[in-house]
Image (spheres, grey):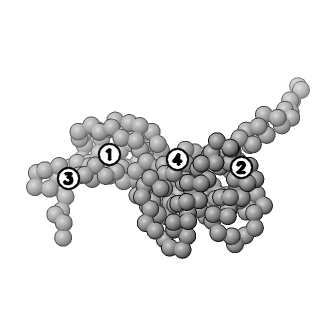
Amino acid sequence: MKSKIQWSAGNIGSKDFVCGYCGNGLVSEKGWQGGVAGQPAASIYICHYCTRPTFIDYDEEQIPDVKFGGDVEGISESLVSELYNEARNCMSVSGHTAAVLCSRKLLMNVAVSKGAKEGLQFIKYVEYLSDNHYVPPDAKDWVDHIRKKGNEATHEIAIMQRENAEEIISFVEMILRLVYEFPAKVKRKTSPVTTTVT
Ligand SMILES: [Zn+2]
């Protein structure tokens, strides 16, 4: 059994980090400092913005860590939105393989919502999005890269590294912006404005 940590609350050494809950960067000195045999072992810092606690281990591992990828607005399908958030959340707990699997399922869903057949291989859906111009020409290299990575693990669940997960989430983020966010923004701008005459 690991040594028990003795906790003390109050003002502890200041620490700058990015909060995994709200995404704000901050310097905090409020929280709990834990020690084993008089040596600092771990800390819990409280975010000034969202007031939630972040655990930082003795080796600087942060839980929850920062979500990878940016917020995308205008996603009309709740399943797509939930899968994207789930993939991003997986990154905050170093669940890279889960993030990749989630991202693949997401790309399949987006392709099906845009007319692709159900029950195809993941690669076919990436090709569908590319062939139907949802991927811009300059991002075609991404398709080849994602295809190659997908082929490597078609019939098995290979353990993925952070780099693999970041790549596919970046790709997904781009697709979601092009398929949902930008069209929704234009729609808002071009929809007739109703004015109230008093
Ligand atoms: Zn926060």
Ligand 1's quadrant is top left
Residue at disc 1, secondary structure: strand
Please name the residue that numbered disc 1 is placed on.
45
The answer to whether 90 is drawn above or below residue 54 in the figure is below
Query: Real-space Cα distance between discs 2 and 3?
Result: 49 Å
The answer to whether 137 is drawn above or below residue 35 in the figure is above
Does the beta carbon of the residue at mark 1 sit less than 8 Å from ligand 1? no
Q: Tell me the mark number nearer the camera, choosing from 3 and 4.
A: 4
Please name the residue that numbered disc 2 is placed on.
134
Q: Quadrant of residue 188?
A: top right
Q: Tell me the mark number nearer the camera, choosing from 1 and 2.
A: 2
Task: For the residues labelled 2 and 3, say whether their Cβ atoms are less than 8 Å apart.
Answer: no
Q: Which mark is residue 41?
A: 3
Task: For the residues labelled 3 and 4, say whether their Cβ atoms are less than 8 Å apart.
Answer: no
Q: Residue at x 48, y 49 (%)?
A: 68
Query: Real-space Cα distance between discs 4 and 1?
Result: 23 Å
Q: Where, quadrant-wise, is the N terminus in this rendering?
A: bottom left
Task: For the residues labelled 1 and 2, say whether their Cβ atoms are less than 8 Å apart.
Answer: no
Q: Tell me the mark number nearer the camera, choosing from 3 and 1.
A: 3
Residue 46 position in % (x across, y down): 35, 44
